[in-house]
Amino acid sequence: MSTDTSRAPRTLVIVPTYNEADNVVGAVSGIRRCVPTADVLVADDASPDGTGEIADRLAGEDTQVFVLHRAGKEGLGAAYLAGFAWAFERDYDVVVEMDADGSHRPQDLPGLLAGLRSADVALGSRWVPGGGVVNWPWHRRLLSRGGSLYARLALGLPVRDATGGFRAYDAKVLERLVAEPVDSQGYCFQIDLAWRAVRGGFTLQEIPITFVERERGESKMTGGIVVEAVRKVTRWGVESRVQRLRSRSTGSDGQASAPSAGRAS
């Protein structure tokens, strides 16, 4: 990451919400406590339980809290993309993805941000030494580990936790990563951005975090999200291998086209 060394990086933590009335206050207050210099953007998908109104109250009490009201529930990926665009328009240096349900601990934020000192993308990882999960049943562990393993095998993605959604990006790098359309959701959205970063020649670092299963509210994980990830990762892997074979036959360098290339200046 490269920023103006005369000032601290302007950091925005994006917290997408849908029916998180029981959790949004704790999430926002935790972020503000652990990283007081960071701004927080709650991207709410018109939650019928009043999450957006609670977020408005928080914004009214704290000038570093903002709310992006969206028309309706369009999925995690769309909420993050809207938040990214909001950040780019306001020239933030660092953009963070973070869940509202308490699964991502605010106390892990400083370590995640520190990872950007030597990388373009810092990934909060449950599956590296020092990382872990709390109160997860065996089938959730299997799903997470299996999804990351499949992404490594299918795409050659060199990370242990490819599906995690607790991440920090150099904003200039992130802007390049999403320069081409992104229509993935859930697990697949996270795999997509990580793979774009690898293909673009950017550096990734996994930072150990502790993931805590939500205590209040309902999980947004569905079978459709898992199916989307399997289908798209499989297709991307096949397309990448076919392109490499074609490139070898024509004598080119074998690199598949990528949404972005090179480190940010």
Image (spheres, rainbow, N blue to C red):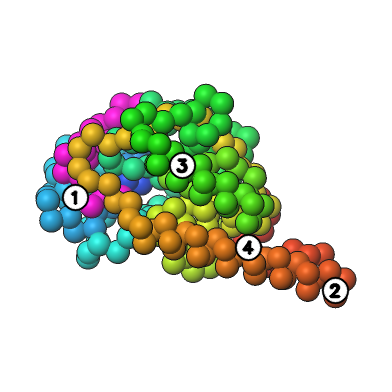
Residue 142, numbered label? 3
Query: Does dot 3 land on a helix, a strand or a loop?
Result: helix
Residue found at x 57% / y 63%? 234
Comparing marks 2 and 1, which lies closer to the viewer? 2
| Sequence-first tag of 2 and 3 | 3
Disc 1: which residue? 19
Query: Does dot 4 land on a helix, a strand or a loop?
Result: helix
For disc 3, the neighbor class at 10 Å (few under 14, some 14 to 19, many from 20) is few
Above or below — where is 33 with respect to 226?
A: above
Comparing marks 3 and 4, which lies closer to the viewer? 3
Disc 4: which residue? 237
| Sequence-first tag of 3 and 4 | 3
Task: Give, as a single range, the part of the protein colored magenta.
Answer: 16-37
Disc 2: which residue? 249
Q: Quadrant of residue 128?
A: top right
Image check: 207 left or right of 139? right
Q: CA distance from mark 2 to mark 4?
A: 19 Å
Query: Does dot 1 land on a helix, a strand or a loop?
Result: loop
Above or below — where is 148 with respect to 68?
A: above
| Sequence-first tag of 1 and 4 | 1
Q: What amino acid type is highlighted by mark number 2? A: Ser
Q: CA distance from mark 1 to mark 3?
A: 27 Å
Q: What amino acid type is highlighted by mark number 1? A: Asn
Q: What amino acid type is highlighted by mark number 4? A: Gly
Image check: 200 left or right of 248? left
